Image: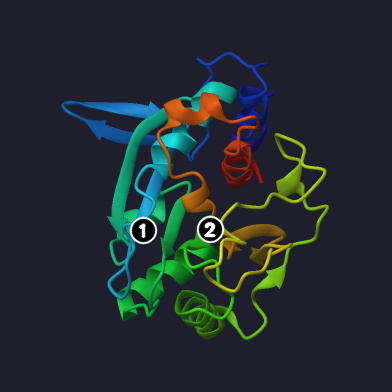
Amino acid sequence: MSLTRKAFLQHLILGSCAAALPLGSRAQNIESGNRREHYDFYFTRLMYESGDWDVDQRMPSNLLNSLVEYTNLKVDLKEHIVPLADNKMLLAPFCYLAGHKLVQFTTEEARNFRDYVNRGGFVFVDDCNHDIDGLFAKSFEAQMAELFGHDCLQKLPDDHDLYHCFFPFDELPVTSFELNGWGDDLVHDYLKAIVVNGRIAVLYSNKDFGCEWDYDYRNKRWLAIDNTKFAVNIVIYALTS
């Protein structure tokens, strides 16, 4: 009996399936010199014209290291930076978009973001201001309302699969940046999401997870609790939902 990509990845992540088994139609291949490498996951950061997209520069390598550490996925350890206006982003299994400043998509950026979301893509969007009344939050939420409708961003329930799909979280993940005297000085006790066909297509955070995970992965050994475990959940959800 053949496995769907979702079922295959679920088995692979749990270590109960041989790594040599073929993936489904959404298998990712990346050019590497004169040969094509196959990976189960690669990280794509979206570059957009209006804001400061190049933030949290150590976060991707930290997240990727955690995937290698905790799962059996074959992970591309290189961060891929792709303009949102470039149709190549439509092929990515997972996209990351973050910043502090204005989010105002060009016509091409808006088209690709909408098409990617509606075709089954997954975008993790992180507000580096951790401020629900800040420029990034207001402009990004306005952009989403324009693309997907006024009430498209909904609060994620505390019992959502995102919190249990790999590591179980009995309490919602928080960040140390939410109460540091900058931003709105509030703990954001929920995330928001745009849901398409029953699955999260856009996961939106005011918690500044990107800054929380923006450290050299070799320093993780000094933490009492590995704070990147929720990052692993986000990726696993994106791949298997």
Question: On screen, 109 above or below 223?
Answer: below
Residue kind at label 1, given as amino acid type: Leu
Q: Secondary structure at mark 1?
A: strand
- Percent of width and height locating residue 224: 64, 29
Of marks 1 and 2, the one in the foreground: 2
Cα separation between marks 1 and 2:
17 Å
Residue at the extreme front of the image, as rendered = 181
Residue kind at label 2, given as amino acid type: Asp
Question: On screen, 106 above or below 172?
Answer: below
Q: Are marks 1 and 2 in contact (CB under 8 Å)?
A: no
Q: Which residue is mark 1?
A: 46
- Percent of width and height locating residue 232: 59, 37
Q: Secondary structure at mark 2?
A: loop
Q: Residue at x 31, y 54 (%)?
A: 88
Q: Is residue 27 visible in the rendered structure shown here?
A: no
Q: Is residue 54 visible in the rendered structure shown here?
A: yes
- Percent of width and height locating residue 131: 55, 72
- Percent of width and height locating residue 123: 51, 58
Q: Quadrant of residue 204?
A: bottom right
Q: Residue at x 47, y 52 (%)?
A: 211
Question: On screen, 65 above or below 16?
Answer: below
Label 2 CA crowd tier, 10 Å (few <14, some 14–19, many 20+) = many
Residue 216 numbered tag: none
Q: Earlier in the sequence, mark 1 or mark 2?
A: 1
Question: 146 or 2, which lies in front?
Answer: 146
Label 1 CA crowd tier, 10 Å (few <14, some 14–19, many 20+) = many
Taking 5 as reference, is 26 left or right?
Answer: left
Labels in figure, total: 2
Q: Which residue is mark 2?
A: 208
Q: Quadrant of the N terminus?
A: top right
